[in-house]
């Protein structure tokens, strides 16, 4: 018995495989195209992000430039103010030296007032002696008592005036001592030559 072999027939399986292959190929193409589209979108977004970053960095750089210009103008103004202050300080230094000279002359005058006060004290003593002499002369010379009473009155007025003057000189000496205290303190605080 001889068996017959049937030649392999083109089965419907091959058509199915071709259709499946074509479908797979179109699916693969769709996947590739969708990936390309996604990559294009991501690239566009990246470009927009880079552009926005550049714009933001430009705005920051412009702000820093304005800040630097403002600071530069403020530094120039501060420098001008410091120069003016330096000029004021030099004029203050000159005036302080003038004040020091005036205070020195005041001290010399106060020293002269001290000598006047001592002379007034000596004059007071002399006037007391004169008053005693006048009293003795009045007791010895009766004939001259009327004329000497006028002299005595004058001498009393001079004595009173000298006493008042002595008190005024004492008060002036105390006032000048008090007045020279701040000047001496200033001299110690600002020792100008």
Image (cartoon, rainbow, N blue to C red):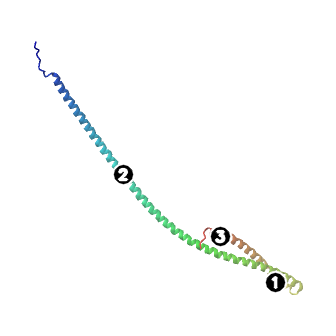
On the rendered image, what quadrant is the C terminus found in? bottom right
Residue depicted at 43% across the width and 61% down the height? 73
Q: Please, what secondary structure does the residue beneath circle 2 have?
A: helix
Q: Can you give x and y, in whole percent of width and height, for residue 131 in the image?
A: 83, 81
Reading the image, the residue beneath label 3 is: 184
Q: Which mark is residue 59?
A: 2
The quarter of the picture where residue 70 lies is bottom left
At x 85%, y 83%, the residue is 133
Q: Earlier in the sequence, mark 3 or mark 1?
A: 1
Task: Please tell me which residue is depicted at 63% across the width and 70% down the height of the picture.
Answer: 187
The one of 75 and 127 positioned closer to us in this rendering = 75
Q: Which x, y percent locates residue 82?
A: 49, 65
Whether label 3 touches label 2, CB < 8 Å: no
The quarter of the image holding the N terminus is top left
- Of label 2 and label 1, which has the lower sequence position? 2
Residue 137 found in image quarter = bottom right
111, 169: nearer the viewer: 111
What residue does disc 1 label? 151
The furthest residue to the front:
1
């Amino acid at each position: 018995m001889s068996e017959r072999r049937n030649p392999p027939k083109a089965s419907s399986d091959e058509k199915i495989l071709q259709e499946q292959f074509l479908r797979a190929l179109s699916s693969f193409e769709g996947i590739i195209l969708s990936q390309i589209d996604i990559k294009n979108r991501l690239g566009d977004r990246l470009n927009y992000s880079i552009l926005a970053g550049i714009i933001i960095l430009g705005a920051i750089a412009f702000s820093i430039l304005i800040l630097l210009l403002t600071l530069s103008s403020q530094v120039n103004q501060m420098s001008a103010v410091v120069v003016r202050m330096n000029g004021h300080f030099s004029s203050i230094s000159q005036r302080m030296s003038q004040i020091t000279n005036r205070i020195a002359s005041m001290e010399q005058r106060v020293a002269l007032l001290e000598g006047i006060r001592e002379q007034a004290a000596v004059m007071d003593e002399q006037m007391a002696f004169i008053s005693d002499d006048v009293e003795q002369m009045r007791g010895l010379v009766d004939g001259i008592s009327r004329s000497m009473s006028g002299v005595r009155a004058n001498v009393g007025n001079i004595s009173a005036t000298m006493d008042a003057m002595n008190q005024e000189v004492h008060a002036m000496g105390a006032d000048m001592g008090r007045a020279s205290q701040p000047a001496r303190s200033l001299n110690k605080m600002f020792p100008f030559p």
